[in-house]
Image: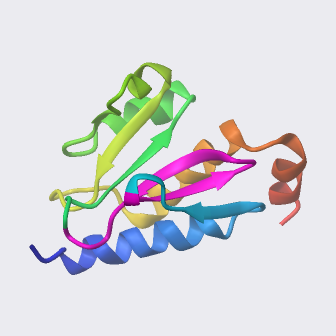
């Protein structure tokens, strides 16, 4: 199944933004792309090969951002019990899915929850 171009573009922007954050690395546990900082995942990027609908999963501790993310079409608390600690899965292929800029804001928020203070200071200095 082909991935809609606009969803793929968003995904690529989010991935590029995620990996551009201080100390961020990309790994492929379970065959899906994740961005990590300090050996901890701050965004699950899933797969871009069309085997699953494109989505990003982020940790949003801020109540407002968390509630806003859950209003995205098809968004849901993440599976495997992660939803209880603030993780939200946001599909990118749905009509009305969030814009890349908003997704990147949420990625940054997720990063700030997980990254060590030293790297957050580096990010703030940019």
User: How far from the left and from the top, in percent, is residue 115?
Assistant: 74, 44
- Determine whether, in the image, residue 65 is placed left or right of residue 68: right
Query: Of residues 119 and 38, which is closer to you in this image?
Result: 38
- Rendered residue at 43%/75% (across/down): 12
- Determine whether, in the image, residue 79 is placed left or right of residue 126: left
- Rendered residue at 49%/61% (across/down): 28
User: How far from the left and from the top, in percent, is residue 118?
Assistant: 90, 48
| Above or below, comparing residue 73 to residue 77 in the picture | below
From which residue to which does the magenta span run? 31-50
- Rendered residue at 42%/65% (across/down): 100
* Residue 113: in magenta span: no
| Above or below, comparing residue 84 to residue 58 in the picture | above
The total number of labels drawn is 0
Q: Residue furthest front?
A: 30
- Rendered residue at 70%/43% (across/down): 112
Quadrant the C terminus occupies: bottom right
User: How far from the left and from the top, in percent, is residue 31?
Assistant: 39, 60
Tell me where residue 96 sits by quadrant: bottom left
Quadrant the N terminus occupies: bottom left
| Above or below, comparing residue 109 to residue 30 in the picture | above
Q: Residue furthest left?
A: 1
The colour scheme is rainbow
- Determine whether, in the image, residue 29 is placed left or right of residue 39: left
User: How far from the left and from the top, in percent, is residue 81?
Assistant: 39, 22
* Residue 43: in magenta span: yes
Q: Is the magenta stretch mostly helix, strand or loop?
A: strand
| Above or below, comparing residue 1 to residue 55 in the picture | below
């Amino acid at each position: 199944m082909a991935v809609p171009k606009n969803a793929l573009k968003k995904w690529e922007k989010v991935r590029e933004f995620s990996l551009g954050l201080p100390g961020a690395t990309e790994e492929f546990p379970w065959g899906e792309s994740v961005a990590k900082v300090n050996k901890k995942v701050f965004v699950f990027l899933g797969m871009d090969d069309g085997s699953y609908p494109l989505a990003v999963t982020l940790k949003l501790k801020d109540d407002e951002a968390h509630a806003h993310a859950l209003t995205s079409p098809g968004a849901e608390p993440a599976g495997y019990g992660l939803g209880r600690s603030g993780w939200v899965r946001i599909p990118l292929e749905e009509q009305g899915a969030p814009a890349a800029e908003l997704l990147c804001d949420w990625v940054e928020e997720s990063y700030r929850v997980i990254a060590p203070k030293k790297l957050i200071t580096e990010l703030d200095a940019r």
